[in-house]
Amino acid sequence: MDLSKEARHHQCMKHIDIHHHFVCEHVEDGTFKVVHCPTELMVVDGLTKPLAHDVFSKMVDALGLILY
């Protein structure tokens, strides 16, 4: 999020390519707005990271999946 607000070059970010600059330009002109989305609101996180069983179960239910 911080990188999208500030387009200056950092030495440790040499690997970031044109996509970063694309996003920064659109954040500056107001086309994009970068916001934090907590894990509770991102149900696909249940498929991409380790979570506590109860949180995982809620996300599986929200996706409409059935655990066997």
Image (cartoon, rainbow, N blue to C red):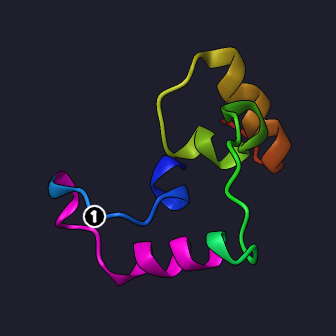
Q: Quadrant of residue 47?
A: top right
Position of 25 with respect to 30 (left or right) is: left
Q: Is residue 32 above or below residue 45?
A: below
**Most foreground residue, 68 or 21:** 21
- Per the image, label 1 sits on a secondary structure element best described as loop
Q: Is residue 13 magenta?
A: yes
Residue 36 position by quadrant: top right
Tell which residue pokes out farthest to the front in this image: 8
Residue pictured at 47% horizontal, 28% vertical: 50
To which residue does mark 1 refer?
9
Residue 54, how many percent across, how many down?
Answer: 71, 16
Three-letter code, disc 1: His
Q: Position of residue 51 (x, y in %)?
A: 55, 24
Task: From the viewer's side, name the closer residue of 11 and 41.
Answer: 11
Residue at x 58%, y 16% (from the top left corner) = 52
- Is residue 42 a member of the stretch shown in magenta? no
Q: Nearer the viewer, residue 18 or 28?
A: 28
Q: Is residue 57 left or right of residue 16?
A: right
Main SS type for the magenta part?
helix
Residue 29 picture quarter: bottom right
Position of 56 relative to 9 (above/below): above
Q: Which residues are magenta?
A: 12-26
Q: What residue is shown at x 63% (from left), y 78% (from top)? A: 26
**Percent position of residue 66, x then y:** 75, 42
Work out which quarter of the rendered image holds the C terminus and state it: top right
Q: How many discs mark residues in the rendered view?
A: 1
Along the viewing direction, whichever of 8 and 18 lies nearer the viewer: 8
User: Horizontal and vertical percent for residue 28?
Assistant: 63, 71
- Disc 1: CA contacts within 10 A as few (<14), some (14-19) or many (>=20): few
- What residue appears at the point 22 percent right and 59 percent down from the top-left corner? 13
